[in-house]
Image (tube, rainbow, N blue to C red):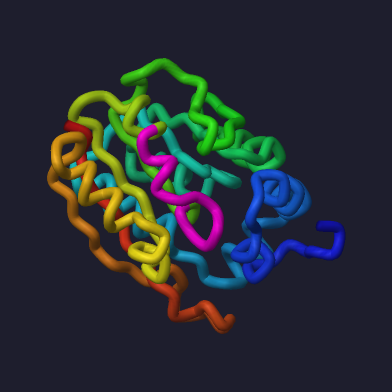
């Protein structure tokens, strides 16, 4: 993957965990400036606010925390404690420098998260369930570490909600494992965005573990 450079197009084209680690290791140091600010990225704000509006509270696990954009909004809204998990150690290093997280957990979500069952009262994820990153097969790993009644707020790229099987997976989970599922749709980028993805939207899957 040596020819790939850190940008949104490249991130959307990633397929393997190894490619994710390599790209985000290179991107971590200036991700906030070269992506979040330049693209007027807003999804983390929508996701954090939706979690709080739904009654979410800590302890919270920020899944795919990256450099801590969503965690910073959560902390600013008075949510805590917050732990971060990500496949990229370099991204987690940047996140921990913001002094908003209690702990950092390096993990590939497809392999599960190495924490005890029923550890969290809230699970939040912004920008992780998107093009080629993770599919609905990762949801059981999140349910395992969530307490009964835990509030979830998971952003899912709207283009892939049905195509990658999220709609079907959440429908099945709603038969007994989760309840109060709602799917508000939000803009991923703000008015200042100019790239080809500026009009993209995401669904925020809000639900509670049974």
Give the residue at x 86% y 58%.
Answer: 2
Q: Please tell me which residue lies in front, 35 or 147.
A: 147
> Relative to 199, is 54 on the left or the right?
left
> Relative to 43, is 207 on the left or the right?
left
- Locate residue 25, reporting x and y percent: 74, 46
Question: Considering the image in quadrants, where does the N terminus appear?
Answer: bottom right
> Relative to 175, is 83 on the left or the right?
right
Q: Is residue 176 above or below residue 115?
A: below
- Locate residue 94, reporting x and y percent: 66, 41
Q: Quadrant of residue 79?
A: top left
Q: Quadrant of residue 107?
A: top right
Question: Considering the image in quadrants, where does the C terminus appear?
Answer: top left
Q: Quadrant of residue 177?
A: top left
Which segment did they paint magenta?
Answer: 129-140
Give the residue at x 60% y 65%.
Answer: 12
- Locate residue 33, reporting x and y percent: 66, 62
Give the residue at x 42% y 46%.
Answer: 125
Number of numbered tags placed on the structure image? 0
Q: Is residue 136 magenta?
A: yes
């Amino acid at each position: 993957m040596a020819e790939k450079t850190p940008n949104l197009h490249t991130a959307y084209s990633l397929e393997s965990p190894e490619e994710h680690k390599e790209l985000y290791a290179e991107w971590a140091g200036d991700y906030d400036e070269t992506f979040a600010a330049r693209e007027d990225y807003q999804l983390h704000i929508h996701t954090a606010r939706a979690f709080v509006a739904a009654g979410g509270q800590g302890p919270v696990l920020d899944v795919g925390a990256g450099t801590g954009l969503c965690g910073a909004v959560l902390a600013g809204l008075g949510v805590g404690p917050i732990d971060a998990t990500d496949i990229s150690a370099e991204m987690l290093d940047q996140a921990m420098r913001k002094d908003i997280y209690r702990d950092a957990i390096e993990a590939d979500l497809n392999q599960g998260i190495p924490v005890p069952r029923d550890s969290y009262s809230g699970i939040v994820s912004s920008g992780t369930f998107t093009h080629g990153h993770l599919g609905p097969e990762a949801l059981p790993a999140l349910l395992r570490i969530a307490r009964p009644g835990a509030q979830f707020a998971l952003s899912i790229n709207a283009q892939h909600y049905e195509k990658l099987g999220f709609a079907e997976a959440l429908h099945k989970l709603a038969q007994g494992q989760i309840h109060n599922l709602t799917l508000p749709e939000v803009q991923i980028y703000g008015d200042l965005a100019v790239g080809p993805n500026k009009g993209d939207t995401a669904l925020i899957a809000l639900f509670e573990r049974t």
